[in-house]
Amino acid sequence: MNEQSMREQLTFDGEEMYQEESFTDRRIGSIQRLTPVTADGERDEARQVRYIGQTQVMSPAGALPISFELEVDSLSDAIAGFPEAAEKAVEETVEELKRLQREHQSSIMVPGQEGGMGGSGGMPGGQGGVPGGGIKF
């Protein structure tokens, strides 16, 4: 990567600045309040405040962070809407992981299948190189 390209990628967008505040119950997760500001740090009234919920769930692979936007206008509404939005985000994440797992499993060549190289195909270990066969839900 050339130096100019790197610099372009690392350029801060002064038109899309937000001040972050974080609120947590220290049990379930946190809510970020993103207040739009101008490049000089003043409140940008032309843009809406955004709220982002964050939590984590345990999976066989360990803690899985979940982040989701809360479509609300206040912190109290974000608190009230957190459980439903978090549940939906977790369900969507689990479905996406299952889809990725299915795609991965369908691309594994197992011994005995015709490989593109004329050999038996597959990877050693019978699981396509994935210990334990991947994530299971």
Image: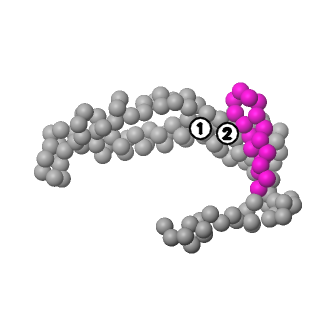
Query: How much space separates mark 2 and mark 1, taking CA atoms?
Result: 7 Å
The location of residue 39, given as percent across then percent down, is 80, 65
Q: Nearer the viewer, residue 99 or 135?
A: 135
Q: Nearer the viewer, residue 97 or 11?
A: 11
Q: Main secondary structure of the magenta part?
A: strand
Residue displayed at 17% across by 48% down: 115
Q: Are marks 2 and 1 in contact (CB under 8 Å)?
A: yes
Residue named by callout 1: 65
Camera sees residue 77: no
Residue 54 badge: 2
132 within the magenta span = no
Q: Nearer the viewer, residue 17 or 100?
A: 17
Residue displayed at 59% across by 65% down: 9
Residue 1 versus residue 29 in the image, above or below? below
Residue displayed at 22% across by 42% down: 122
Label located before the other in sequence (2 or 1) = 2
Q: Which residues are magenta?
A: 18-34
